[in-house]
Image: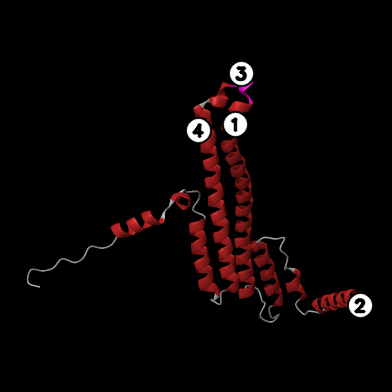
Amino acid sequence: MPKFILPCLLLMLLLAGCASENCDNRELIGILSPNQSSAGLLMNYAKISACRADTVQLKAGSDEEKKLILIYDLYIKARSYKAWNSLFFGLSVTAAIAVFLWPALGVIFKSREQHWPWLQSPIMQTTVTGIAALMFAFYSQYKTKQTQTENLMRTATYSSMALEPLSRKIIADMSSIDEGFNFNNVFDHPDSKSNTAEKTEPAPPPVSPGG
């Protein structure tokens, strides 16, 4: 009896594969791959949505075409941010390892201390630590920008809002994302924001003597 278990399992797997191949949403199933970024998945889905639009309605300047261009614009930015994010992630990891191993270099190359006096130099150690912090700041900056841009792509994909107000909202959000490099996202703390909010609260109106 156990001899028939393995053939039965193989038959079930084959039937399941045939069922997936006969699916009507082959294009949609084809883009489902874990070996891609979130921005790439949303971009491929936007292409399928534009191709599936009614041929009569899909005229020049239609909403589906404009939404596809909007999502593709966001995709270009997200892809660029991902490239910079990956670069500075590798540099920040390398610099962090250098910070941890730098004190050990003086012990390992103790025989060359006279030839390499900079190994024990506090200025050199401070410089390496500063470079590591700077690389992490760049990585955090571009990682935040990538996440924000991908969230805008999700908004453009899943939102039921009309195209005109949706595009205005996304363009306004992208303007704030494209402001350039700043350290606010790295060093901002909730306490400082709450203190700022308390300082900006309007003062209560003066009470009249007769009231």
What distance separates the C-alpha of mark 2 from that of mark 1?
63 Å
Along the horizontal axis of the image, is 37 left or right of 204?
right
Q: Where does the C terminus fall, quadrant-wise?
A: bottom left
What distance separates the C-alpha of mark 1 from that of mark 3?
17 Å
**Amino acid at dot 2:** Phe
Instruction: From the image, state whether disc 1 or disc 3 is nearer to you.
Output: 1
Instruction: Determine the residue positioned at 55% across, 40% down.
Output: 132
**Amino acid at dot 4:** Thr
* Viewer-proximal residue among 152 and 189: 189
Residue ID for mark 1 = 104
Q: Quadrant of residue 8?
A: bottom right
What distance separates the C-alpha of mark 4 from that of mark 3?
20 Å
Instruction: Determine the residue positioned at 52% across, 37% down.
Output: 129
Question: Which of pointers 4 and 3 lies earlier in the amino acid sequence?
Answer: 3
Residue 24 coordinates in the image, percent (x, y): 77, 80
Residue 49 coordinates in the image, percent (x, y): 68, 74
**Amino acid at dot 1:** Ala
Question: Which of pointers 1 and 3 lies earlier in the amino acid sequence?
Answer: 1
104 relative to 160, above or below = above
On residue 126, the disc is 4
Residue ID for mark 3 = 115
Secondary structure, mark 4, is helix
> Do we see residue 62 in this rendering?
no
Residue ID for mark 2 = 4
Q: Main secondary structure of the magenta part?
A: loop
**Amino acid at dot 3:** His
Question: Which of pointers 2 and 3 lies earlier in the amino acid sequence?
Answer: 2
Query: Which stretch did the figure color magenta?
Result: 109-116
In reply to whether residue 97 is colored magenta, the answer given is no
